[in-house]
Amino acid sequence: MEQQTKVHAEDGKQELVITREFDLPLELLFKAYDEPELFEQWMGTKVLKMENKKHGSYAFETSYNGNVVFRANGTIHEFIPNQKIIRTFEMENTAFPVQLEFLEFEKLTDETSRLTIHIVFRSVEFRNQLLQMPFAQGINMAHNQLQEIAGKLK
């Protein structure tokens, strides 16, 4: 089955471009990234902090059998509702350095929208390390959950 979230990695570049079209109005797609309760549902993670504003920050963690297996945090540099979020992303307790993420939300029709995420890594090597993990499958699963959960709010 073809994955709906596309991950494009150009050889020799230290970036990824991720795109996904959703059968969701733009406002509902953005809400999935803006509201902590909704974010927790589709990401399957606990939001520890979410200050969605310029110079705000966020932190979340994922647990399995009571043990924290993943924790991430970052600073929000720009936050324009229904348009874009520019933020840093840091996976705690890993060798991965901070990355820069540009999330752009685009209205296609009254009932459909597109998300484009441009991620810039410190090096091509770090980007390639991430691609060796089940990253593409994971983001597809998360976006499928986003579509399903937010779709029920229409």
Image (cartoon, rainbow, N blue to C red):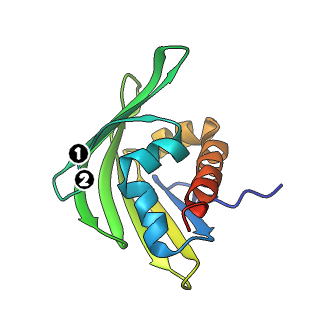
For label 1, the residue is 57
**Residue 102 vertical position relative to residue 145 in the rendered view, above or below:** below
The quadrant in which the C terminus is found is bottom right
The type of residue carrying mark 2 is Ile
**Residue in the picture at 54% in, 75% down:** 113
Q: Can you name the residue that lies furthest to the right here?
A: 1
**Residue in the picture at 60% in, 60% down:** 152
Callout 2: 10 Å neighbours few (<14), some, many (20+)?
many
For label 2, the residue is 76
Q: Can you name the residue that lies furthest to the left here?
A: 55
> In the image, 99: left or right of 134?
left
SS under mark 1? strand
Whether residues under marks 2 and 1 lie with C-beta atoms below 8 angstroms apart, the answer is yes
Q: Position of residue 112 (x, y in %)?
A: 58, 77
Q: Judge by depth and name the residue closer to the eye, 10 or 113.
A: 113
The type of residue carrying mark 1 is Ser
Q: Position of residue 101 (x, y in %)?
A: 37, 55
